[in-house]
Amino acid sequence: MPLAAPAYALLGYIIIVAKFFAALPFATLTLPAFNALWLALAYALLFVGYAYIKKSDGGAVNGTATL
């Protein structure tokens, strides 16, 4: 438990800073509802990008490809 007090203090600081910035004017932004079609397109784009990268580096794992 030697790390409990510093962790508690740092987390308390983070909460205080977050509350301060949340209280500033125009700190909130309201967005319209997110359409499920856009979500599907975003995931498809991520999948295609991942597949492209894996194909271009020969399927290397964890950056083990040679240059």
Image (cartoon, rainbow, N blue to C red):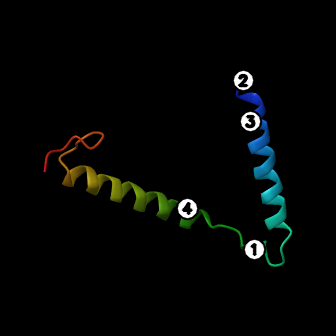
User: Are discs 1 and 4 less than 8 Å apart at CB?
Assistant: no
Q: For marks 3 and 4, give the one nearer the viewer.
A: 3
Quadrant of the rendered structure where residue 36 is?
Answer: bottom right
Count residues near mark 2 (Cα–Cα under 10 Å), then give few for <14, some for 14-19, many for 20+: few
Left of 61 or right of it: where is 28? Answer: right
User: Are discs 3 and 2 less than 8 Å apart at CB?
Assistant: no
Query: Sequence order check: which comes first, mark 2 or mark 1?
Result: 2
Q: For marks 2 and 4, give the one nearer the viewer.
A: 2
The Cα–Cα distance between marks 3 and 1, rounded to whole angstroms, is 33 Å
Q: Is residue 67 above or below residue 1?
A: below
Q: Amino acid at mark 4?
A: Leu
Q: Nearer the viewer, residue 45 or 25?
A: 25
Q: Nearer the viewer, residue 2 or 12?
A: 2
Q: Nearer the viewer, residue 30 or 27?
A: 27
The Cα–Cα distance between marks 1 and 4, rounded to whole angstroms, is 20 Å
User: Are discs 3 and 4 less than 8 Å apart at CB?
Assistant: no
Left of 42 or right of it: where is 65? Answer: left
The Cα–Cα distance between marks 3 and 4, rounded to whole angstroms, is 40 Å
Quadrant of the rendered structure where residue 60 is?
Answer: top left
Q: Residue at x 78, y 59 (%)?
A: 18
- Residue at the disc numbered 4: 39
Q: Residue at x 27, y 55 (%)?
A: 53
Of the 4 image quadrants, the one containing the N terminus is: top right
The Cα–Cα distance between marks 2 and 4, rounded to whole angstroms, is 44 Å
Instruction: Give residue 29's mark.
Output: 1
- Report the number of discs: 4
Query: Sequence order check: which comes first, mark 1 or mark 4?
Result: 1
Q: Secondary structure at mark 1?
A: loop
- Residue at the disc numbered 3: 6
